[in-house]
Amino acid sequence: MGVFKEGDIVIGKVSFADSHIFKIRPTLIIVERFTSNDFVVLYITKTSYSDEYSIPIYANDIETGHIKYIPSYVRVNKPHILPRNKLYNKVAELKEEKMKQITEVWEKYRE
């Protein structure tokens, strides 16, 4: 398990409505909580949604690494807190410009 930072796409173990059901899926680290070992992550999906909170990721948005589906979509309105032990490996890192776009939508969502 490595050191993760904002902008990293990391494979994580996330739970759904029933906390006993988990899925291994890509997530985007949007905030590292420095007071604990927790991270605020956003789900990444291959499904497009027609709303302002679904941000596409294309191959040219990735600084390093790769993701399975291009395009994929960051679900800004689906934040979750995951502890470090539920984040497994970094698969990619977003370019600064794409992360800025996602952060702006994230800030709007949080208002």
Image: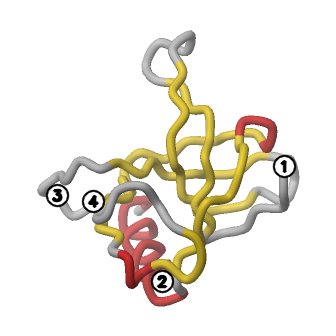
Q: Closer to the N terminus: mark 4 or mark 2?
A: 4
- Most foreground residue, 100 or 48: 48
Give the quarter of the figure containing the C terminus.
bottom left
Residue 17: image x %, image y %? Answer: 43, 19
Which residue has dot 2 on it?
A: 100
Disc 1/disc 4 C-alpha distance (Å)? 28 Å
Q: Closer to the N terminus: mark 1 or mark 4?
A: 1
Under tag 2, what secondary structure? helix
What residue sits 73% from the left and 67% below the top?
A: 5
Q: Closer to the N terminus: mark 3 or mark 1?
A: 1
Q: Residues within 10 Å of mark 4 (few under 14, many from 20)?
A: many
Q: Does the residue at mark 1 contact the one at mark 4 (Cβ under 8 Å)?
A: no
Under tag 1, what secondary structure? loop
Q: Looking at the rendering, which quadrant does residue 84 occupy?
A: top right
Q: Does the residue at mark 4 contact the one at mark 3 (Cβ under 8 Å)?
A: yes
Residue 33: image x %, image y %? Answer: 76, 56
For this view, does 74 lie left or right of residue 24? left
- Residue depth check, mark 3 versus mark 1: number of the one nearer the observer: 1
Disc 3/disc 1 C-alpha distance (Å)? 34 Å
Which residue has dot 3 on it?
A: 51
Which residue has dot 1 on it?
A: 1
Residue 24: image x %, image y %? Answer: 55, 33
Name the residue type under label 1.
Answer: Met
Q: Does the residue at mark 1 contact the one at mark 2 (Cβ under 8 Å)?
A: no
Identify whether 68 is placed above or below 65: above
Disc 4/disc 3 C-alpha distance (Å)? 6 Å
- Residue at the farthest bottom position: 97
Name the residue type under label 4.
Answer: Ser
Name the residue type under label 3.
Answer: Asp
Disc 1/disc 2 C-alpha distance (Å)? 26 Å
Which residue has dot 4 on it?
A: 54
